Amino acid sequence: MDRFSASDRLIYFQSQQIPMEEILSVNNLKKYFTKKGSSGVSKDITRVADGISFSIKNGETLVLAHFR
């Protein structure tokens, strides 16, 4: 069995002919959460995503991460 380093694998996979068709497209994604106060009225708004657009093609990976 041949041993490859991470960079060897990257080159190997890049050399393969994979059609890069779009499999997912998102435009202007917005997601907000509201926190209601004791009176039931919206108090705070947390914007998780505000106007994000992206597309994913065959063979690509998308990672979403939240850092505080």
Image (cartoon, helix red, strand yellow):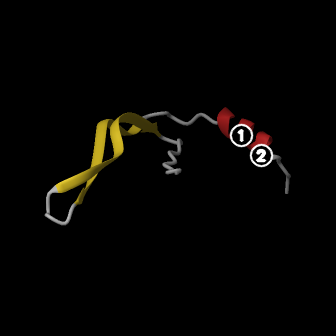
Residue 64: percent from left, percent from top:
48, 48
Residue drawn 40% across and 35% down? 54
The x and y percentages for residue 22 are 40, 35
Which residue is denoted by mark 1 in the rendering?
A: 10
Q: Is residue 65 left or right of residue 45?
A: right
Q: What residue is disc 2 on?
A: 6
> 50 and 5: which one is in front?
50
| Residue 2: numbered disc | none
- From the viewer's perspective, tell me whether residue 26 is left or right of residue 60: left
Amino acid type at circle 2 is: Ala
Q: Quadrant of residue 34?
A: bottom left
Q: Residue at x 35, y 43 (%)?
A: 49
What SS does tag 1 mark?
helix
Q: Which quadrant, please, contains the N terminus?
A: bottom right
Pointers 1 and 2 in contact (CB under 8 A)?
A: yes
Instruction: State the separation of the CA atoms marked 1 and 2.
Output: 6 Å
In this orientation, which residue lies closer to the viewer: 35 or 15? 35
Badge 2 marks a residue whose secondary structure is: helix
